[in-house]
Amino acid sequence: MSKAKPKLALYWAASCGGCEIAVLAVNEKILDVAAAFDIVFWPVAVDAKVRDVEKMPDGSIDVCLFNGGIRTSEQEYMAQLLRRKSKALVAFGSCAHEGCIPGLANLNNREEIFNTVYKEGSATQPENPKNLRPLPETEVAEGTLHLPVFYDTLKTLNQTVAVDYYLPGCPPEAENILAAVTAIIEGKLPPPGSVIGKNTTVCDECPRKRNEKKIKKFHRTWEIIPDEETCLLEQGLLCCGIATRAGCGALCPAVNSPCIGCHGPNDGVLDFGARMMSALSSVIDSEDPEEINRIIQEGIPDPVGSFYRFSLAASQLRRKHRPANEKSATTK
Ligand code: SF4
Ligand code: SF4
Protein backbone atom coordinates (compact mmCIF):
# COMPACT_ATOMS: atom_id res chain seq x y z
CA MET A 1 0.00 0.00 0.00
CA SER A 2 1.39 3.45 -0.90
CA LYS A 3 2.17 5.87 1.94
CA ALA A 4 -0.52 8.54 2.57
CA LYS A 5 0.50 12.00 1.41
CA PRO A 6 0.70 14.85 3.95
CA LYS A 7 -2.46 16.97 3.98
CA LEU A 8 -2.17 20.64 2.99
CA ALA A 9 -4.69 23.46 3.45
CA LEU A 10 -4.47 27.04 2.19
CA TYR A 11 -6.75 29.85 3.33
CA TRP A 12 -7.22 33.52 2.47
CA ALA A 13 -8.46 35.99 5.13
CA ALA A 14 -8.03 39.84 5.07
CA SER A 15 -5.55 40.23 2.24
CA CYS A 16 -5.39 41.19 -1.42
CA GLY A 17 -5.04 37.68 -2.84
CA GLY A 18 -1.44 38.22 -3.92
CA CYS A 19 -0.24 35.41 -1.65
CA GLU A 20 -2.55 32.99 -3.46
CA ILE A 21 -1.08 34.11 -6.77
CA ALA A 22 2.42 33.74 -5.31
CA VAL A 23 1.66 30.07 -4.69
CA LEU A 24 0.85 29.71 -8.38
CA ALA A 25 4.08 31.58 -9.23
CA VAL A 26 6.02 28.45 -8.36
CA ASN A 27 4.92 27.59 -11.93
CA GLU A 28 5.24 23.98 -12.97
CA LYS A 29 6.56 23.14 -9.48
CA ILE A 30 2.95 23.48 -8.35
CA LEU A 31 2.61 20.01 -9.85
CA ASP A 32 5.30 18.79 -7.44
CA VAL A 33 3.36 20.38 -4.58
CA ALA A 34 0.17 18.76 -5.82
CA ALA A 35 2.01 15.44 -6.16
CA ALA A 36 3.61 15.67 -2.71
CA PHE A 37 0.51 16.83 -0.81
CA ASP A 38 -3.11 15.97 -0.60
CA ILE A 39 -4.65 19.47 -0.87
CA VAL A 40 -7.70 19.17 1.38
CA PHE A 41 -8.84 22.80 1.52
CA TRP A 42 -8.02 25.73 -0.77
CA PRO A 43 -11.17 27.76 -1.41
CA VAL A 44 -9.64 29.82 -4.22
CA ALA A 45 -8.71 26.73 -6.27
CA VAL A 46 -10.36 23.58 -4.89
CA ASP A 47 -14.04 22.96 -4.27
CA ALA A 48 -14.20 22.10 -0.58
CA LYS A 49 -16.56 23.55 2.00
CA VAL A 50 -16.04 24.76 5.54
CA ARG A 51 -18.30 21.96 6.76
CA ASP A 52 -15.82 19.49 5.21
CA VAL A 53 -13.06 20.98 7.37
CA GLU A 54 -15.31 20.96 10.44
CA LYS A 55 -15.78 17.21 9.99
CA MET A 56 -12.02 16.47 9.85
CA PRO A 57 -10.43 15.09 13.03
CA ASP A 58 -8.43 17.66 15.01
CA GLY A 59 -4.77 17.73 13.95
CA SER A 60 -5.48 15.85 10.72
CA ILE A 61 -4.16 18.61 8.38
CA ASP A 62 -0.36 18.45 8.35
CA VAL A 63 0.28 22.02 7.19
CA CYS A 64 -1.97 25.04 6.74
CA LEU A 65 -0.64 28.08 4.86
CA PHE A 66 -2.86 30.89 6.19
CA ASN A 67 -2.61 34.27 4.48
CA GLY A 68 -4.36 37.45 5.54
CA GLY A 69 -5.09 39.26 8.76
CA ILE A 70 -8.17 38.83 10.94
CA ARG A 71 -10.76 41.55 10.32
CA THR A 72 -14.09 39.72 10.65
CA SER A 73 -15.78 37.14 12.86
CA GLU A 74 -15.73 34.69 9.92
CA GLN A 75 -11.96 35.01 9.53
CA GLU A 76 -11.54 34.60 13.28
CA TYR A 77 -13.64 31.42 13.19
CA MET A 78 -11.62 30.04 10.26
CA ALA A 79 -8.33 30.80 12.04
CA GLN A 80 -9.56 28.95 15.13
CA LEU A 81 -10.93 26.06 13.07
CA LEU A 82 -7.78 25.65 10.96
CA ARG A 83 -5.60 25.98 14.07
CA ARG A 84 -7.50 23.10 15.65
CA LYS A 85 -7.37 20.94 12.54
CA SER A 86 -3.70 21.60 11.64
CA LYS A 87 -0.48 20.24 13.07
CA ALA A 88 1.55 23.17 11.67
CA LEU A 89 -0.09 26.54 11.10
CA VAL A 90 2.03 28.89 8.96
CA ALA A 91 1.39 32.67 8.89
CA PHE A 92 1.92 32.94 5.17
CA GLY A 93 2.90 36.39 3.93
CA SER A 94 2.96 39.82 5.46
CA CYS A 95 -0.80 40.20 6.18
CA ALA A 96 -0.96 37.12 8.41
CA HIS A 97 2.51 37.83 9.80
CA GLU A 98 2.28 41.58 10.55
CA GLY A 99 -1.08 42.91 9.29
CA CYS A 100 0.46 44.53 6.18
CA ILE A 101 -1.60 47.12 4.22
CA PRO A 102 -5.01 45.98 5.63
CA GLY A 103 -3.52 46.71 9.08
CA LEU A 104 -3.06 50.38 8.16
CA ALA A 105 -6.85 50.63 8.52
CA ASN A 106 -6.13 50.47 12.27
CA LEU A 107 -5.52 54.22 11.88
CA ASN A 108 -9.32 54.45 11.68
CA ASN A 109 -12.22 52.84 13.48
CA ARG A 110 -14.98 50.83 11.89
CA GLU A 111 -17.37 53.76 11.63
CA GLU A 112 -14.79 55.82 9.78
CA ILE A 113 -14.05 52.91 7.45
CA PHE A 114 -17.76 52.34 6.75
CA ASN A 115 -18.26 56.07 6.14
CA THR A 116 -15.45 55.99 3.58
CA VAL A 117 -16.98 53.01 1.79
CA TYR A 118 -20.76 53.36 2.22
CA LYS A 119 -21.60 57.02 2.82
CA GLU A 120 -23.63 58.46 -0.04
CA GLY A 121 -21.39 60.52 -2.25
CA SER A 122 -18.20 58.71 -1.22
CA ALA A 123 -15.89 57.55 -3.99
CA THR A 124 -17.20 53.98 -3.79
CA GLN A 125 -20.88 54.75 -3.04
CA PRO A 126 -22.40 57.47 -5.23
CA GLU A 127 -25.94 56.49 -4.11
CA ASN A 128 -27.06 55.30 -0.66
CA PRO A 129 -30.10 57.46 0.22
CA LYS A 130 -31.09 55.27 3.21
CA ASN A 131 -27.54 55.39 4.57
CA LEU A 132 -27.44 51.58 4.73
CA ARG A 133 -24.55 49.81 6.40
CA PRO A 134 -23.72 46.09 6.54
CA LEU A 135 -25.30 44.55 9.66
CA PRO A 136 -24.45 41.19 11.25
CA GLU A 137 -28.16 40.28 11.22
CA THR A 138 -31.00 41.48 8.98
CA GLU A 139 -34.60 40.28 9.23
CA VAL A 140 -36.30 39.58 5.90
CA ALA A 141 -39.57 37.78 5.08
CA GLU A 142 -37.71 34.51 4.59
CA GLY A 143 -35.83 34.66 7.91
CA THR A 144 -32.63 36.17 9.28
CA LEU A 145 -29.72 36.99 7.00
CA HIS A 146 -26.25 36.85 8.56
CA LEU A 147 -23.06 38.68 7.65
CA PRO A 148 -19.71 38.36 9.42
CA VAL A 149 -19.09 41.00 12.11
CA PHE A 150 -16.57 43.57 10.88
CA TYR A 151 -14.20 44.24 13.78
CA ASP A 152 -12.84 47.64 14.68
CA THR A 153 -9.25 46.43 14.74
CA LEU A 154 -7.39 44.19 12.32
CA LYS A 155 -5.41 41.52 14.16
CA THR A 156 -2.48 39.47 12.95
CA LEU A 157 -2.86 35.71 12.89
CA ASN A 158 -0.77 35.22 16.05
CA GLN A 159 -2.91 37.79 17.90
CA THR A 160 -5.79 35.38 17.27
CA VAL A 161 -4.37 31.83 17.52
CA ALA A 162 -1.00 30.21 18.15
CA VAL A 163 1.20 30.17 15.03
CA ASP A 164 3.95 27.61 14.37
CA TYR A 165 5.89 29.29 11.55
CA TYR A 166 6.03 32.57 9.67
CA LEU A 167 6.82 32.95 5.99
CA PRO A 168 7.50 36.67 5.38
CA GLY A 169 7.04 38.80 2.28
CA CYS A 170 4.38 40.69 0.38
CA PRO A 171 3.97 38.21 -1.11
CA PRO A 172 6.56 35.55 -0.19
CA GLU A 173 8.86 34.88 -3.14
CA ALA A 174 8.16 31.69 -5.09
CA GLU A 175 11.54 30.14 -4.29
CA ASN A 176 11.04 30.79 -0.57
CA ILE A 177 7.60 29.14 -0.73
CA LEU A 178 9.13 26.14 -2.45
CA ALA A 179 11.98 25.98 0.07
CA ALA A 180 9.48 26.09 2.95
CA VAL A 181 7.22 23.49 1.39
CA THR A 182 10.24 21.25 0.69
CA ALA A 183 11.44 21.67 4.28
CA ILE A 184 7.98 20.64 5.47
CA ILE A 185 7.99 17.57 3.20
CA GLU A 186 11.47 16.60 4.40
CA GLY A 187 10.78 17.38 8.05
CA LYS A 188 13.61 19.93 8.11
CA LEU A 189 11.73 22.88 9.56
CA PRO A 190 13.32 25.23 12.12
CA PRO A 191 12.06 25.21 15.73
CA PRO A 192 8.37 26.16 16.13
CA GLY A 193 7.82 29.93 16.37
CA SER A 194 10.54 30.65 13.79
CA VAL A 195 10.36 32.89 10.78
CA ILE A 196 11.33 30.62 7.88
CA GLY A 197 14.18 32.32 6.03
CA LYS A 198 17.28 34.35 6.65
CA ASN A 199 18.16 36.43 9.68
CA THR A 200 20.27 39.07 7.92
CA THR A 201 19.11 42.32 6.30
CA VAL A 202 18.28 43.33 2.73
CA CYS A 203 21.42 45.52 2.85
CA ASP A 204 23.45 42.30 3.16
CA GLU A 205 22.00 41.10 -0.15
CA CYS A 206 22.15 44.47 -1.91
CA PRO A 207 25.12 45.05 -4.23
CA ARG A 208 24.95 48.86 -4.02
CA LYS A 209 28.03 50.67 -2.73
CA ARG A 210 27.86 52.15 0.76
CA ASN A 211 30.22 54.99 1.62
CA GLU A 212 28.91 55.82 5.11
CA LYS A 213 27.78 59.15 3.74
CA LYS A 214 25.28 61.09 5.86
CA ILE A 215 22.36 63.02 4.43
CA LYS A 216 20.82 66.46 4.94
CA LYS A 217 17.61 65.81 3.03
CA PHE A 218 15.22 62.97 2.18
CA HIS A 219 13.73 62.92 -1.29
CA ARG A 220 10.46 61.40 -2.45
CA THR A 221 11.03 58.69 -5.03
CA TRP A 222 9.78 60.81 -7.92
CA GLU A 223 11.98 63.79 -7.07
CA ILE A 224 15.32 62.32 -8.14
CA ILE A 225 16.71 59.72 -10.50
CA PRO A 226 19.21 57.88 -8.30
CA ASP A 227 22.47 56.55 -9.66
CA GLU A 228 22.37 52.81 -10.05
CA GLU A 229 25.40 51.85 -8.00
CA THR A 230 25.28 53.86 -4.79
CA CYS A 231 23.18 53.00 -1.74
CA LEU A 232 19.74 54.61 -2.18
CA LEU A 233 19.64 55.74 1.44
CA GLU A 234 22.89 57.63 0.98
CA GLN A 235 21.22 59.37 -1.97
CA GLY A 236 18.42 60.54 0.34
CA LEU A 237 15.79 57.93 -0.54
CA LEU A 238 14.11 56.28 2.44
CA CYS A 239 15.28 52.69 1.92
CA CYS A 240 14.15 50.29 4.64
CA GLY A 241 16.71 47.65 3.68
CA ILE A 242 18.73 48.49 6.79
CA ALA A 243 15.97 47.18 9.06
CA THR A 244 14.35 44.54 6.84
CA ARG A 245 14.86 40.78 6.87
CA ALA A 246 16.73 39.43 3.86
CA GLY A 247 15.40 36.71 1.62
CA CYS A 248 14.13 38.54 -1.45
CA GLY A 249 17.55 39.08 -3.02
CA ALA A 250 17.15 42.89 -2.65
CA LEU A 251 14.59 42.93 -5.46
CA CYS A 252 13.53 46.55 -5.13
CA PRO A 253 16.95 48.27 -4.86
CA ALA A 254 17.95 46.18 -7.89
CA VAL A 255 15.42 48.16 -9.95
CA ASN A 256 16.34 51.56 -8.43
CA SER A 257 13.47 51.49 -5.98
CA PRO A 258 13.92 51.70 -2.20
CA CYS A 259 13.02 48.70 -0.05
CA ILE A 260 9.72 49.38 1.70
CA GLY A 261 10.15 46.66 4.32
CA CYS A 262 7.78 43.90 3.22
CA HIS A 263 9.78 41.10 4.84
CA GLY A 264 9.45 42.68 8.28
CA PRO A 265 12.19 42.82 10.89
CA ASN A 266 14.79 40.27 11.90
CA ASP A 267 14.54 38.00 14.92
CA GLY A 268 14.41 39.79 18.24
CA VAL A 269 13.15 43.14 16.86
CA LEU A 270 9.86 43.92 18.57
CA ASP A 271 8.91 46.94 16.52
CA PHE A 272 9.99 47.45 12.91
CA GLY A 273 9.21 51.19 12.89
CA ALA A 274 11.24 51.85 16.03
CA ARG A 275 14.14 49.84 14.59
CA MET A 276 13.94 51.81 11.34
CA MET A 277 13.85 55.17 13.14
CA SER A 278 16.85 54.21 15.23
CA ALA A 279 18.74 53.11 12.10
CA LEU A 280 17.93 56.43 10.41
CA SER A 281 19.27 58.43 13.32
CA SER A 282 22.77 57.33 12.36
CA VAL A 283 22.29 58.48 8.76
CA ILE A 284 21.02 62.03 9.29
CA ASP A 285 23.80 64.59 9.08
CA SER A 286 22.90 66.81 12.02
CA GLU A 287 23.13 66.99 15.79
CA ASP A 288 20.65 69.83 16.05
CA PRO A 289 17.18 68.55 17.16
CA GLU A 290 15.39 71.34 15.29
CA GLU A 291 17.22 70.64 12.07
CA ILE A 292 16.63 66.86 12.44
CA ASN A 293 12.95 67.58 12.99
CA ARG A 294 12.84 69.70 9.84
CA ILE A 295 14.69 67.09 7.75
CA ILE A 296 12.20 64.40 8.85
CA GLN A 297 9.06 66.52 8.53
CA GLU A 298 9.97 67.79 5.06
CA GLY A 299 11.27 64.49 3.71
CA ILE A 300 9.02 61.93 5.42
CA PRO A 301 5.52 63.45 5.42
CA ASP A 302 3.81 60.12 6.24
CA PRO A 303 5.83 58.53 9.09
CA VAL A 304 3.25 55.80 9.85
CA GLY A 305 2.96 54.83 6.19
CA SER A 306 6.74 54.92 5.83
CA PHE A 307 7.80 53.11 9.00
CA TYR A 308 4.75 50.90 9.69
CA ARG A 309 3.45 50.22 6.18
CA PHE A 310 3.54 46.47 6.76
CA SER A 311 3.67 46.17 10.52
CA LEU A 312 1.26 48.60 12.20
CA ALA A 313 -1.08 45.85 13.45
CA ALA A 314 1.86 43.88 14.89
CA SER A 315 3.66 46.91 16.31
CA GLN A 316 3.73 48.29 19.82
CA LEU A 317 1.31 50.99 18.59
CA ARG A 318 -1.08 48.43 17.05
CA ARG A 319 -3.85 50.94 16.29
CA LYS A 320 -4.95 54.55 16.71
CA HIS A 321 -5.98 55.38 20.26
CA ARG A 322 -9.56 54.25 20.92
CA PRO A 323 -11.71 56.35 23.26
CA ALA A 324 -12.67 54.47 26.44
CA ASN A 325 -16.40 54.95 25.77
CA GLU A 326 -16.40 52.75 22.63
CA LYS A 327 -18.24 49.52 23.46
CA SER A 328 -16.09 46.40 23.51
CA ALA A 329 -18.71 44.31 21.67
CA THR A 330 -18.37 46.52 18.62
CA THR A 331 -14.70 47.30 18.84
CA LYS A 332 -13.06 43.90 19.09
S1 SF4 B 1 19.89 50.91 2.40
FE1 SF4 B 1 18.85 50.07 0.60
S2 SF4 B 1 20.07 50.69 -1.16
FE2 SF4 B 1 21.32 50.96 0.66
S3 SF4 B 1 22.46 49.06 0.80
FE3 SF4 B 1 20.64 48.82 2.08
S4 SF4 B 1 19.13 47.86 0.72
FE4 SF4 B 1 20.77 48.65 -0.58
S1 SF4 C 1 13.55 44.84 -1.26
FE1 SF4 C 1 12.28 45.15 0.58
S2 SF4 C 1 10.23 45.71 -0.22
FE2 SF4 C 1 11.40 44.82 -1.94
S3 SF4 C 1 10.83 42.65 -1.92
FE3 SF4 C 1 12.71 42.85 -0.68
S4 SF4 C 1 11.98 43.10 1.45
FE4 SF4 C 1 10.23 43.49 0.09
Image (tube, helix red, strand yellow):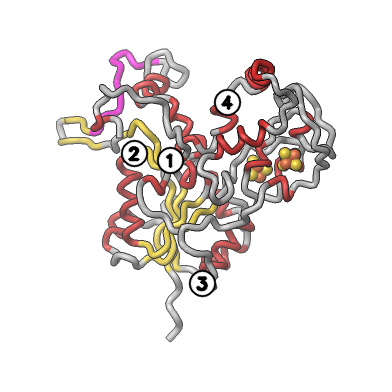
In primary-sequence order, the first of circles 4 and 2 is 2
Q: Do the residues labelled 4 and 1 touch (CB within 8 Å)?
A: no
* Mark 4 vs mark 1, CA separation in Å: 24 Å
In primary-sequence order, the first of circles 2 and 3 is 2
Q: Where is residue 21 in the image (x, y as percent from the top left)?
A: 55, 49
In primary-sequence order, the first of circles 3 and 4 is 3
Is residue 9 something that shows in the picture? no
Residue at the disc numbered 3: 187
Residue appearing at x 68%, y 41% in the figure? 241
Q: Nearer the viewer, mark 3 or mark 4?
A: 4
Residue at the disc numbered 2: 72
In primary-sequence order, the first of circles 1 and 3 is 1
As displayed, is residue 245 above or below residue 281? below
Q: Do the residues labelled 2 and 1 touch (CB within 8 Å)?
A: yes
- Farthest residue toward the front? 287
* Mark 2 vs mark 1, CA separation in Å: 8 Å
- Which residues make up the magenta segment? 127-136
Q: Are marks 1 and 3 in contact (CB under 8 Å)?
A: no
Q: What residue type is labelled 2?
A: Thr
* Mark 2 vs mark 3, CA separation in Å: 34 Å
